Image (cartoon, grey):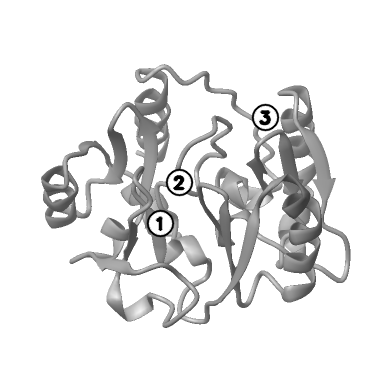
Amino acid sequence: MAHRQWQSYVDAFAERGWEVREVDVDDACPDSVFIEDAGFVFGEIAVVARPGAPSRRPEVPPVAAALEQAGYSLCQIEAPGTLDGGDVLKIGDDVYIGVGGRTNRAAIDQVAGFLEPFGARVHPVANDAVLHLKSAVTALPDGVVLGWGPVTPAEGLPPVFDMPEEPGAHVVDLGGGDVLIAASAPRSIELVAGRGWSPVVVDIGEFEKLEGCVTCLSIRLRDRCAS
């Protein structure tokens, strides 16, 4: 089942013009399917994460190699900094980073040093309700932030549009007005469509059992309004 859901997720990107590059599977790193935690990109820079869970750090080198091969300049988070890519929400030049169990302020200071010379504005956001910031909030292509009330951070973000289901707070901008969203959020799918976007619905139920969502199964390399 998980393999079929994974292929449907990959197909959603490929059918909309994305070139999909899959990093080699490492059975010793079962969480590596949640590849977003290994890093993120801003312009021509790839920030290579240092996950807050030491057991996940072996996942990072192959992802860093793939990002370098894709043409990005690498910046590496160093100790004592810890950062999971799932804590990073980019909306244009604004980079919101959750401070919580997996990401600390030392890492956020490093990110600011890497990216502010290139026009980024880095904003720490206190997050203690969920594992990662993007488990609580993401954003539509126009920059409208989506959240689910019980886990939305109280401050540090632009105004948040409250969704009726937790998975409805998780979307990915696929370009061209298409928005990736999980099948487990039917009322939220209707709301996204009502705001003028075209929902691309995928079933990722097997990954949701492990606290995964549509953002954490990929690192999007194209420049987008929100990711």
Between circles 3 and 2, the one closer to the viewer is 2
Q: Mark 1 or 2 closer to N-term?
A: 1
Q: Which residue is mark 3?
A: 24
Q: Amino acid at mark 1?
A: Thr
Side (left or right) of 215 relative to 113: left
Q: Which mark is residue 138?
A: 1
Q: Amino acid at mark 3?
A: Asp
Between circles 3 and 1, the one closer to the viewer is 1
Determine whether 118 is above or below 77 in the image. Answer: above
Real-space CA distance between mark 3 and mark 1, rounded to the nearest whole angstrom: 27 Å
Q: Are marks 1 and 2 in contact (CB under 8 Å)?
A: yes
Q: Residue at x 41, y 53 (%)?
A: 213
Q: Residue at x 74, y 39 (%)?
A: 45
Asked whether 48 or 176 is in front, the reply is 176
Could you tell me which secondary element the residue under label 3 belongs to?
Answer: loop
Side (left or right) of 154 relative to 77: left
Q: Which mark is residue 226?
A: 2
